[in-house]
Image: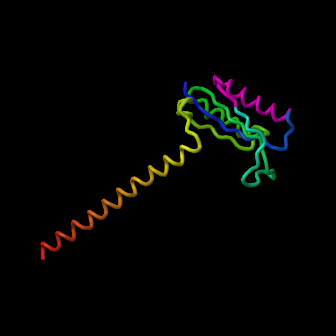
Amino acid sequence: MNKYEMAVVINGRLEEDAKNAVLDKVKALIERFEGTIKNVDEWGKKKYAYEIQKSKEGYYNFIKFEAEPGAPAEIEHRMRIMDGVVRYLIVTDDLPENTQLSKEEAPAEEASADEVPAEEATEDTESEEEAPAEESETEE
C-alpha cells in the first residue's frame, strides 16, 4: 500500500451541511477503492487567487490515505464528475510523518542548493576558457 495526499477544494457557496456531504462522498470514494484514511485536515473557507466558476472562495481540505497503486487513478476518474468539487489533486506522500519541513527551513535549503552549482559552473567555465588560450599561445 502506498501513501497519498489528496487536496480537495469544495465550492464556497455550499452551506455547511452540503459541504460536509461532499466531503463524506470523497471519503467514501477513497474507502470504496480499499483505501484507508489516516488524517483529514480541514483548512476552512479561503479566497481563491482568481475567480473559478464565478466563485471567489472555497473550502480547502487535505486527506492523507493509504491505497493500492491503481486506486488514485480510479478516484480521480470519479472526482471529475462529482458535484460540489471545484478542484482536486492527488500526490504521493513519500515524506515520513515526523520529518516534514517547516516553512522557514525550506527556502534556506533551496537557496544554498542553488548557490553551489552556480559557483561550480563559474569555476568550470573559467578553467575551460584558460586552457584553450594557453594551448593556442604555445602552438604559434
Q: Main secondary structure of the magenta part?
A: helix
Residue 84, located in which quarter of the rendered image?
A: top right
Question: What residue lies at 81% left-to-right and 31% top-to-bottom?
Answer: 21
Residue 21 covered by magenta stretch? yes
Q: Is 48 on the left-hand or right-hand side of 72?
A: right
Residue 82, located in which quarter of the rendered image?
A: top right
Disc count in the image? 0
Residue 69 drawn at (x, y percent): 55, 29
Vertical placement of 51 versus 36: above or below?
below
Residue 5 drawn at (x, y percent): 62, 34
Residue 95 drawn at (x, y percent): 53, 33
In the rendered image, the residue lying farthest to the bottom is 140
Give the position of the N terminus as an image quadrant. top right
Nearest the camera: 27 or 132? 132
**How is the protein colored in the picture?**
rainbow
Question: What residue lies at 81% left-to-right and 32% top-to-bottom?
Answer: 20
Q: Which residues are magenta?
A: 17-40
Residue 101 drawn at (x, y percent): 55, 38
Residue 70 covered by magenta stretch? no
Question: What residue lies at 61% left-to-right and 35% top-to-bottom?
Answer: 73
Give the position of the C terminus as an image quadrant. bottom left
Question: What residue lies at 54% left-to-right and 48% top-to-bottom?
Answer: 107
Nearest the camera: 53 or 77? 53
Residue 13, located in which quarter of the rendered image?
A: top right
Nearest the camera: 47 or 15? 47
